[in-house]
Amino acid sequence: MSRRDDSKAETKALILGAARSMFWEKGADRCTIRDIAAEAGVAPATIIVHFKNKTALLDASLHEDIEKAFSKAQATMPIEDGLHAVLVHMVSSMFSFYDRNRELYRIQFRDTFFEPDHENPTMIKLLKEKLELIAIMIEQEKSKGTVRAEADSFLAASSFFFLYLGVLGDFLRDRELSVASATERLSIILDQHLTGILIFGEGS
Amino acid sequence: MSRRDDSKAETKALILGAARSMFWEKGADRCTIRDIAAEAGVAPATIIVHFKNKTALLDASLHEDIEKAFSKAQATMPIEDGLHAVLVHMVSSMFSFYDRNRELYRIQFRDTFFEPDHENPTMIKLLKEKLELIAIMIEQEKSKGTVRAEADSFLAASSFFFLYLGVLGDFLRDRELSVASATERLSIILDQHLTGILIFGEGS
DNA sequence: TGTACATCAGTGAACGCGCGTTCACTGATGTAC
DNA sequence: TGTACATCAGTGAACGCGCGTTCACTGATGTAC
């Protein structure tokens, strides 16, 4: 790190800090890039030097907290209680996290979720990492003999993520849906997903 | 319908027609409201009289086709082949439909999916209808004895939708993912969902 | 049936806003010798 | 170690674009009597 790089990093951190507090206080739709630049004591064009656009700035400014929340949830997983308990724990932790500012995270999802992968590094990268993690957990369950050997671990992990994202979507859109209700809903869904709903369970 | 209402409806239809062809040809992001107004032979302000904004216009202009596609898929369901076959049929039909212009439908999802329910009439309404339908199908399977009586039909239907939307999201984002691959992926996911992946399937 | 008035769809031009981009410039830092 | 030049982060002002909104207006249609 040269002095030049240091000062560049410092400017970037200044912008990220200003962005975080402005977005958090006023909401993403009510902040302009120029507002944030003023708050950071920096020229508007400087923000565009560091971040492609407002969405990239929002995404970057929220990424660290989300990562921390995930890591914390991961560190406190009740591994001995089985797959269902572990997954519900993760989900419940994340719902609590997002509940601190649902509206802001709704905007983040809205603005990044359907972007093509290459436009969308931090969000997708994080989810892919966690997907990997869950796939590994499912593989471990297989060796413990609790999950059927012929099940596709990666697709099972994807399924779990889709179910999580589905309930999370409802949660972010609907202020009336409490953390507890959302978690309960996902717990049932997950239980049905893990055990299947069919009676003669030998699918096609 | 008075003459006044007739002419109003006619103007609206003119706008919708122009919007449909312009969006389809140039892509939603490359059309302006003024472009569409010019194409429809109407003043820009007239569009705002009929539709709240560009997103509402996009949503309205695509709604009819989507509804038709759903109805067609529904009319050709292989009911006698069981739940898995029926759901895969629906999904496969919809993937083929969306494949006619993935980019356009991606934009539609991007711009409407995370909006709060009250902002988002046509999309959500349609999905809620289909959710209802699938829940009823699952109830019927219960009375046939193929689905466990204690399963929650509504949550099972929601689960199916979340899985569908998950794969659809991948499909819309990733040009490399073919209709066949996406359908196959969902078929496996659905199979695992219906039969469960656990060996001792008596979940919590 | 006719008249006088009310309603309302649509017009077209103008406006303000936020975003992203451009560009010539400054001044500090880094590098070649 | 010093000098001369190159690099590059950041500046600040200006620009063009698309969106949504506003507003005074027109003229056809509807309604009360």
Image: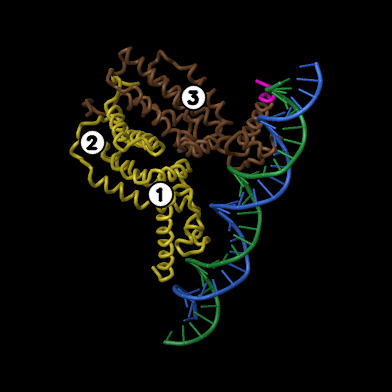
Chain colours: A brown, B yellow, C green, D blue
Q: Which mark is residue B112?
A: none
Q: Is residue B150 visible from the viewing direction of this image?
A: no
Q: Kindly report the distance in space between the C-alpha atoms of the residues bearing marks 1 and 3.
A: 33 Å
Front tag of 3 and 2:
2
Amino acid type of the residue tagged 2 in the rendering = Ala
Which percent across, then down, holds residue A44?
Answer: 67, 40
Q: Quickly name the residue at label 1.
A: B122
Graded by Cα atoms within 10 Å as few (under 14), some (14 to 19) or many (20 or more), the crowding at tag 3 reads many
Q: Which mark is residue B85?
A: 2
- Pick whichever, A80 or A56, lies toward us: A56
C15 with respect to B169 (left or right) = right
Q: Are marks 1 and 2 on the same chain?
A: yes
Q: Which residues are magenta?
A: A1-6
- Pick whichever, C25 or A164, lies toward us: C25
Q: Which mark is residue A93?
A: 3
Q: Quadrant of residue A40?
A: top right
Graded by Cα atoms within 10 Å as few (under 14), some (14 to 19) or many (20 or more), the crowding at tag 1 reads some
Graded by Cα atoms within 10 Å as few (under 14), some (14 to 19) or many (20 or more), the crowding at tag 2 reads some
A29 with respect to B196 (left or right) = right
Q: Say which quadrant the C terminus of chain A sits in.
A: top left
Residue at the image position 33 percent from the left and 27 percent from the top: A193
Amino acid type of the residue tagged 1 in the rendering = Thr
Q: Is residue A156 above or below residue B18?
A: above
Q: Secondary structure at mark 2?
A: helix
Residue at the image position 40 percent from the left and 55 percent from the top: B21
Query: Magenta segment, principal secondary structure?
Result: helix
Q: Secondary structure at mark 1?
A: helix
Q: Say which quadrant the N terminus of chain A sits in.
A: top right
Label 1 marks a residue whose chain is B
Which percent across, then down, holds residue A22?
Answer: 64, 36
Is A120 part of what is drawn in magenta?
no
Q: Secondary structure at mark 3?
A: helix
